[in-house]
Structure formats: structure tokens, C-alpha cells
Image (spheres, helix red, strand yellow):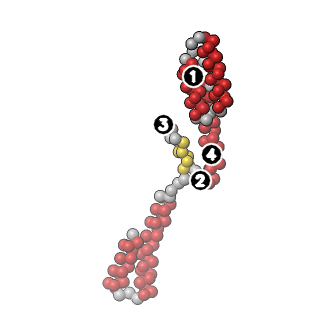
Amino acid sequence: MLFNSILLTTIINTEYQLSYNVGMIVFFLAMSPTLIVTAIGNNEFRKENSKSLAASKPLFFSYRKKEMVEVDAFIGNIKESKKQFFLNEYYKVDHLIPVHTQISRIHWLYEMKYISESDAKFIIDELESKRIIEGL
């Protein structure tokens, strides 16, 4: 649009042989639609900051300055709830699930940094003693 405005100004100036002052007025009149379209386009296509959580169905959050604290707190709550769910589900001795499956889950919890090494060793010792007692 900028080049079209310059070309239009040049054609009008040469066709009507306008003075410098009148030519500048024509140039500013030809540039005004370009500036208006640029301003609208700038607002329309502005890049928004966003933050996301990766998952099978990812969550995207608007991450502007006034929302940063709330978004970070909400994402922290989601991660803490996820951690609590996995701990409640897998960090226990279950008499109906095979011991090797439970040990694999404990290793996974440790790898995901949901439990410490001492916690992992403690529950694995509990599972091993269960295996010895039951003779498995």
C-alpha cells in the first residue's frame, strides 16, 4: 500500500504538474488510507503472549502482564493436583496388584520427581518384605 500511495502521488503530480506544497498535501492524502489500514492491521494481528500446558489436549492461557500471577498460580495448582492424584493412586502397597507392577509404578513416580529417593526405597522395601512374607 505504501508503494501504491507513492505511485499515485507521483502520477497525480506529473499529470497535473502540481507545486511542491500541493504535492505534499496530495501525498499525505494518499498516505492516510495506508496509515489507517496499518493501524488496524497492527491491532488485529498483534502477537499475544500465551502459556500452555502440554497434554493430549493442551491448555493455552493468555499470559499478559496483568494475568501472569493468576495463570502461574492456576498452573501450579493443576500440577500439584496431578502430583497428588498420582501419589494417592500409586504410592501405596496394594495386595491385589502384582508386586513387580507396583515397583514399576514407584520407579515411575521417582523418575517424574513426585517422590524422593528415600520415599522410593521405603515403599520398595515394604513391597519386597510383602513378597518375602507371601512367598512370591
Which dot, 4 or 1, sits closer to the camera?
1
* Mark 2, residue position: 64
Q: Is residue 20 above or below residue 1?
A: below
Q: Is residue 58 above or below residue 25?
A: above
Horizontally, residue 35 falls left or right of residue 122, namely left
* Distance Cα–Cα, label 4 vs label 3: 20 Å
* Residue sitting nearer the eye, 19 or 64: 64
The residue drawn where x is 67% and y is 25% is: 122
In the rendered structure, which disc, 3 or 2, sits on the residue that comes first in sequence? 3
Residue 49 is situated, as x and y percent measured from the top left of the image, at 54, 53
The residue drawn where x is 41% and y is 75% is: 30
Q: Which mark is residue 102?
A: 1
Do the numbered discs 4 and 2 sit on residues whose CB atoms are within 8 Å? no
* Mark 4, residue position: 72
The amino acid beneath tag 3 is Ser
* Distance Cα–Cα, label 4 vs label 2: 11 Å
Helix, strand or loop for disc 2: loop
